[in-house]
Amino acid sequence: MKQIENIPDCGILLFKSCLVSVEYPGIESSTTYVFDKLGIDYLVSDEQSCCTGLGYYFDLFDQMSTTAVAARNFAIARKNGYNNITPMCSTCYAINKEACALLNSNDEVRSNINSVFKQAGLDDLIYEQNSLDEVDNFYHVVELFLSKAKQIGKLNTIDFSGVRVAAHHACHYYKIQSDDMIGNPNHPLLIDTIAKSCGADVVEWYEDKTLTCGAGFSQIHVNRDLSLKVTHAKLESLKEAGVELVLHMCPNCQIQYDRYQPVIEKEYGTKYDFVHMNIGQFVALALGADPEKVCGFQTHSVPLDGFLERIGVSF
Amino acid sequence: MTYVISETLSEYDTPICDTLAETVKKSLRTSDTIGIDRCLQCGACTSSCPAARFTDYNPRTMIKRVMENDMSVIEDETIWNCFYCYTCHLRCPRNNSPTQVVQVLRQMAINKGIGLDRLKVLLEYGDTFAELGVSKIPDLYVGQMEDDFDRRWHEFKNNLDAVRSELGLGPVAVRDSGRGEIRAILEGIGLFERQEKLKQMVESESDTVDKKGQITDEAN
Amino acid sequence: MNHSNDHVGVFICHCGGNISDIIDIRSVKQEIRSDNISTFDCEYLCSNVGQDLIKTSIYKHSLDKVIIGACTPAKHEKLFKKCVEDAQLNASMLEIANLREQCSWVHPNNLATTNKAISLLNGKIKRIQTALPLIPIQIPINPNAMVIGGGIAGINSALNLANNGIHTYLIEKEVTIGGNAAKIGKMFSPEKLAEECSMCSLSPLMNEVGSHPNITLLTYSEVENVNGSAGDFKVTIRKKPRYVKDNCMACGRCSKVCPTYVENDYNCGVKDKKAISMRFAQSVPQVYSIDPDHCIELTGGECGKCRDVCKVDAIDFEQKDEMIELDVGAIVVATGFDEYDASRKPQYGYGIFENVVTQMELARILGVNGPTLGKFARPSDNSMPHNIVMIQCVGSRDEGKSGNKYCSRYCCMAALKHASLIAKKYPDANVTICYIDIRAFGLYENYYRAVQDMGISFVRGRPAEVVQKANHNLVVKIEDTLTQELKEIPADMVVLSSAMEASSGTKQVANILNITLSEDGFVKEKHSKLKPVDTSRDGIFVCGTAQSPKDVTDTIAQSGLAAARTSAFISDKVIRRDPQIAQIERSLCNNCDECLKCPFEAISKDKIGNVDINPLVCNGCGYCTKLCSKGAISIAGYKEEQIMAEIDGVIEKGDVLAFLSREIPYATADNIGNSVAEYPANVKIVQVPTTTIITKAMIEHAFKRGSQAVLLVEEPTDNPVGSFIYPLALENFEQLKGELGKKGARLHFKKAYIPHYRGLAETFISLAQMEDIE
């Protein structure tokens, strides 16, 4: 089981995410901002590819192809000596962790992929069994923040007291490999703990706390009405809990809440008074980052102007 | 039963076995320790399932049909309602995983030519991925997003590169080492061969899909 | 040592024709009779006439040693040993040749069979010439017993032992005995279909414990350390200070004046108890105690009100921990269970929503001496709940990290009991039980049916979540799997049937006693069917929920059994062990420590560095004899020279020699006889402790005597000895095969199972029929 005291702060490969890159690039710049402030030793590699998670959960990519792409990214991590794969996206986290477990435990998968590397003249990508450990080398950025929650609290520059915050922990972080999450997977509290360390008034339990955001990968595109029903249910429960700020740890969920909140307001004839942020954006803001030039809040669909003003940040 | 696609690659996600349960257990998509044989039919999956809450999908009965080797479950449209949220996987007291099972069933459906209308819009995904090293939401879906989202989003999307550079971020695409690594890997694994087959199947299908890619008869 | 001048008596049994119809006893007698060998025969040696013949012959003919040719030693060895002992001979001066199961019952009536009988007797005659008298191992047993844990299991065990005349120490870590049974309020009766007052049954037993002349009750005490072994345990007890002396009259004045209220864990943590209190009115002993964490005086303040009002001067703020040393012969572990922490399933809201409680808490709420004084009220607002939903299997039948794989056994009946209590007293209330399977085994089904008739709702399914709506009202989300409907059941109160888990005390005590736990954390019994209350260590027994989840009925039954086993153990007064175990000749030992590899951990070094063999642990398997390069260790009764002598007598040219380990393999060979199967008479069996003692010299000796093949038959791996020995025996076999070179081809190895006697017979047949390859 993962222990909070064993979370590393060096050798971190900050694993880039396709949806962060094109939808909320501020998550990445916020995360590196926080890492720099906290003195975390990390690398962002322009050779690293996306994890294929979208293709995989769109039912297009197969397990072997996804695992092969993961093996290539693991080689980049090893080559650079940054072996702790740490995504900002929960699906990247789960996909990579699962791929590593398969490469370690399934000889057929490993030899199949290695022979493809050899045939393509890419011998430097060959994966040696157990060269990465599926438990000890895979983290989500939120876990790093959690391990530094005290330090974050000390460096915090904003008075969050009285700000009603709720967290949406991403399903693929805590439900897939639930034994390896920090805390109880039926009541995740990682984001809550970080927000509390900054003095926020955290709503730890609300109805449907563990309900999916509703994106469902292809569901939002193919089964749009169903997808929005789920998101609507969750937004209603957040409204019931009277929150002002919802914190996220996955770009896919953030799209579903931030981008579709105005859509749901229109289609369901309702109104929500809360805004959305990624935990990286929240911590960066707390540590004094510029809301536009670092956090990239201008890319959000639910405007944060009012909220930022309320907490005394000019935007 | 015979599969339309039976090339090597699908052998890993949907190995041909005597029973559905065997296929599920042997599939690379499911955990080695999956407890499908130990299912108690307790319904913890269904009562936890967002799809079951709003549609006729029932992960418990889906598992029962797989255990009973009821092949018609592959053609059941409700299996396409699963969100892959893994709540059933988390809550199952027997280490079973309906969401992993349904992934295998969907792959078997695709092999039979079911659900191709969904995949149709995705067929360029592999090529884009090979080219850029990033996943890209298919154009058809982007069209829906364009309709749904307001001015703020359009502005941002139109200025993505500028926004990124203001945030100190580099290009989105992977730096090409000159070796065409990702394409070579996917080629070697057989992804393109499989995609080509899927394309052929899509082309020979005459049924139509509405413009937004919706499967209209089961969205509610 | 040569004892060839000793006078040997050979007694042959006809077994009413079972032996004498096949074997020509007259010619056998003729063949083996000599100057110092007298022969006798009898219709039934096991009869009184036969026994008398043996005893009187020993006196009359001044016999030094006795050979009996009769049925398998498994049958009457003890009887015949007693005969020779009655006649003042040492029991090791007796050898039995198996002339029935391994001769007359497996071979036809012909000369070869009679010749085999002669050779079997000759083997024993030669072997007994080398025999030395062995002194039986006897260790005295301390007559006191200790029971750890004063719940209903410990109480019942202690009373059974005490009533059996055994002085018993009962150790309880709380201030009173009673345990969880004192909390549950009501017990159900499957015959009367009614609920009965639990305290009314328990309290008299508790009082009996308190006043029993054979019981020394040590409450507020914990076992600190245990040394020694079965029959002779040295126990250290830590008795914690109550700050109230035993002369307390339990008048209660102190509690009245105490200004400090503390959480009452007896009543689900409600703050209704004073810092000086009794746990409950029926506590035994009737002595108050002070909570040192909350008492003003003991936390450095000034108060002393209790001291001022006490009329018997019982308050003593100066009390300290007291260490008590006890000597006991046997121990009963009755350390009970802990209730599963339901907050590990946050989806059910325990610890988050006030109106989610456990069955144990509901028991307290329904109890007249509970936090609400018998008023059925929910915690949030003290109002009476009308809709009560119970959730079964919370933490049970759950493979996940936050659950337990096993069924907790008690919870279905506890839910039915509480549903019945509520339905009878509050007819307006609606009780719903969410279940996966209702396990009302045996006669409990009658009670289940009666509760069904009361109109309780049953919904089959494991709920997903409990959510809280306005006014602390709850909703249980569930799929009714029988109708496939997703339901949201409204509830004023949700009751979780929390699993039973091994108590922290069980783990702590098991660690101190060095007894094995199961993977679920309960004390593991030696055999689930045949030895359900024996632990992995002799002299230590277990009962109640320390051993596995169970209800009161089963706990009472099992604790009675544990007392009976303990009583039987202590009543023996001495532990007798077969003398045929490892013995060391210290003068030959070079302290190479190889023998410490004993797989049963019977061999260790004593304080001055000498090799020490524990006679209670050693089973005489003989593995150590192979580890010792100096020949310093041997198995009494199975020294190499004794086995060589038997081979000398038994083996003739063309014979197959089968060395059979003494438990399963030897019994399997007997079973061939019992089952009227056959094999050739040139197969000769020599019993050994295990085949690990077989040496190259023994096999070469057999070959020299003309044996065409040698077979080693070992205990199977599912036998307690075989599970350790089989792989070592196989290793020994392979090594011997290698050392024998070409001749190794004539050495064979096999394991045996009693029901699979045919397999062994077939091996005998095929080896006997093999051409002599030399």
Image: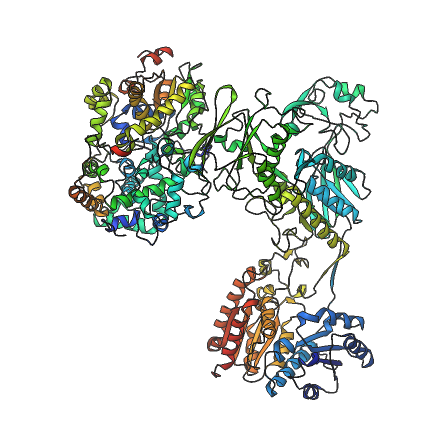
Looking at the picture, how far across and down is residue C663, in whole percent?
61, 66
Front residue of C544 and C511: C544
Front residue of B60 and C639: B60
Which of the 4 quarters of the picture holds residue A280? top left
Looking at the picture, how far across and down is residue C231, in whole percent?
73, 52
* Residue at x 57% of width, y 58% of height: C597
Instruction: Give the residue furthest to the right.
Output: C312
Q: How many marks?
A: 0
Is residue C750 visible in the rendered structure shown here?
Answer: yes
| C151 sits to left or right of C286 | left
Looking at the picture, how far across and down is residue A6, in whole percent?
44, 34
Front residue of A306 and A223: A223
* Residue at x 70% of width, y 65% of height: C579
Up the image or down, A159 lies above or below C572; here it is above
Front residue of B94 and C127: B94
Locate the C terminus of chain A and report the quarter of the image it occupies.
Answer: top left
* Residue at x 25% of width, y 46% of height: B111
Looking at the picture, how far across and down is residue C401, in whole percent?
48, 39
Up the image or down, C97 lies above or below C202; here it is below
How is the structure coloured here?
rainbow
Which of the 4 quarters of the picture holds residue A296? top left
Is residue C220 visible in the rendered structure shown here?
Answer: no
| C95 sits to left or right of A199 | right
